[in-house]
Amino acid sequence: MELVRSHDLTIFVVTETRIQGEAAKRVISSLPFAGRSIVDPIGFSGELWMLWKLNAFILDIIKKDEQEIQAMVKVRHSNFSWLFSGIYASPKFSKRLFLSNNLIEVSDRLNLPWLLAGDFNEILRPIDKIGGRNINWNRAKFYNNCMDHYNLIDLGFSGPRHTWSNHREDGSLILIRIDRA
């Protein structure tokens, strides 16, 4: 609620909430978003919420599955429309390939401004990771090639560079930037 209040959010994507069922419904109902599209978790893995304020946008959900919610967004009181994809990419690279193919299909079919945001579970550059094993250059190259194919630009960030941590303090701390827009 503090994020929504302090940033005056009109569209809010939440990934990996680690809550489900009635508890998830209570949290969603407590937020000031009448529009909602939910992808339920598989066990405690995944989960994706796209929430929006109805007075700001008309959202038409085009597709949703365990890794994405794609919506056509029309700004109320204007003719401006754009595509928004809320992403929770699987930690498994083989499953992320399915997501990549879905996104290629969309980008080849639609000619609209497009925002992708969420947890991509992959890094782009070595600076995106501190600690742990070396980065997998083939996977990083694949991710970079996908961004090139879609003509995407990383919007950057404010706040901490790294969006995931293993929270270890015994000298094996790992920090990674896997969330992007």
Image: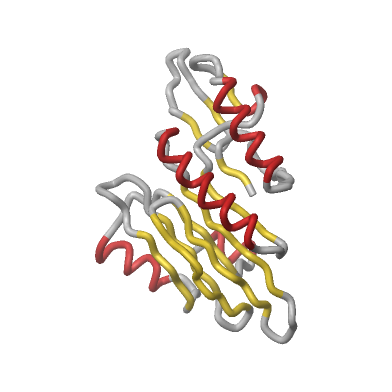
Name the image colouring. secondary structure
Identity of the residue drawn at 43% across and 22% down: 168
Q: Which of 23 and 144 is in front in this view?
A: 144
Identity of the residue drawn at 63% across and 65% down: 83
State the image quarter where residue 145 is shown: top right
Number of numbered labels in the structure image:
0
Reply above or below: 151 against 80.
above
Identity of the residue drawn at 62% across and 62% down: 6
Residue 20 left/right relative to 122: left
Q: Nearer the viewer, residue 124 or 35?
A: 124
Q: Nearer the viewer, residue 148 or 133?
A: 148
Reply above or below: 24 against 139.
below
Q: Nearer the viewer, residue 140 or 146?
A: 146
Reply above or below: 96 against 110.
above
Indicate the position of residue 46 as horizontal and vertical percent values: 37, 48
Indicate the position of residue 34 as horizontal and vertical percent values: 47, 79
Residue found at the far bottom of this picture: 77
Identity of the residue drawn at 42% across and 41% down: 90
Indicate the position of residue 103 as horizontal and vertical percent values: 56, 51
Indicate the position of residue 125 as horizontal and vertical percent values: 66, 27
State the image quarter where residue 84 is shown: bottom right
Residue 92 left/right relative to 33: left
